[in-house]
Image (cartoon, coloured by chain):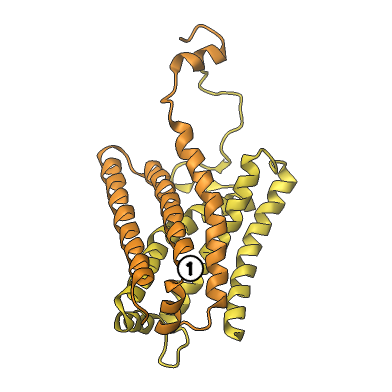
Amino acid sequence: MASRTPARPRSPHLFSGFLKLHYSWGPHMLVSILHRATGSGMATVGTVLLVWWLAAIASGAEAYATFQDVFTTDAGNLNIVGWVVFVGITYAFFTHMLNGIRHLVMDAGAAFELKRNKMFSLIVIAGGFVLTAAFWLYLGMK
Amino acid sequence: MGSGTHIGRVRGLGSAKEGAHHWWRQRVTAGSNLFLTLWFVFAILRMPGYDYASVHTWLQNGWAAVPMLLLVVSVFYHFRLGLQVVIEDYQHEQKRVAAILLLNFFTVATAATAIFAILKVAFGAAA
């Protein structure tokens, strides 16, 4: 039977109960929860969008126009709904993809050193924004 | 159990003999997703337009329809495994069973719709 107060590291919590706080948020914690949030978002909202888009193409011009009307203005640009949904989905995709690559590297047993792990986490956070911006800038300039 | 070495105690408890499967398939689909979704991103960027005629012509081509089918299978498998872990973390007992069932129905229904749509366009007449 293990002792009640084991001599091993405890969760990084300040206070307990209602006031429980992580005393020090690190980038690795942020990308961890971001991975779950972006993955869950794409699995639900992204799936519905993709299936709707494919079904609209299969159904014909009228159904496709309905799909387009929800997300674009009459001039063909994204409206506010389109911006929130599509920029959100692309941000989720690029962040999840980069962190997924980070996870595959860590599955191979690499990049667990504190400094390197922190650096990769920061690259994931920054890279998600950079790739999202690059994607929409390219589309905008096309 | 309980009186031997640590490794002996672990062996005594045994395993479900299938835990690695979920983990491994999540990684395999992560790898295939990386290729297929990157193809999709570049395909979208390179499309001549986003009107009905452009996307319909694009999806009619086998070079788009086949990777699209593979993408649906790989991505939907991957998100099914991922959402299962999320459900297992936050839901318990009966609610967990109900949520997993719902997840299976959602995955199969959306995947079937997507695959049917792709095939309909690919095998259908030009718009």
Three-letter amino acid code at the position of disc 1: Ala
Q: What residue is drawn where x is 52% and y is 45%?
A: B28
Front-most of A89 and B20? B20
Q: What residue is drawn where x is 63% and y is 74%?
A: A134
From the image, which quarter does the N terminus of chain B lie in?
top left
Quick check: A119 left or right of A27?
A: right
- Kindly identify which chain the residue marked by label 1 belongs to: B
Residue furthest bottom in the image: A75
Q: Is residue B7 visible?
A: yes
Specify the colour of chain B. orange
Residue A67, percent from left and from top:
35, 79
Q: What residue is drawn where x is 35% and y is 61%?
A: B115
- Which residue is tagged 1? B64
From the image, which quarter does the C terminus of chain B lie in?
bottom left
Residue A23, percent from left and from top:
60, 47
Specify the colour of chain A. yellow
Taking B21 as reference, is B124 above or below it? below
Quick check: B105 left or right of A48?
A: left
Q: Secondary structure at mark 1?
A: helix
Q: Is residue A24 visible?
A: no
Residue furthest top in the image: B3
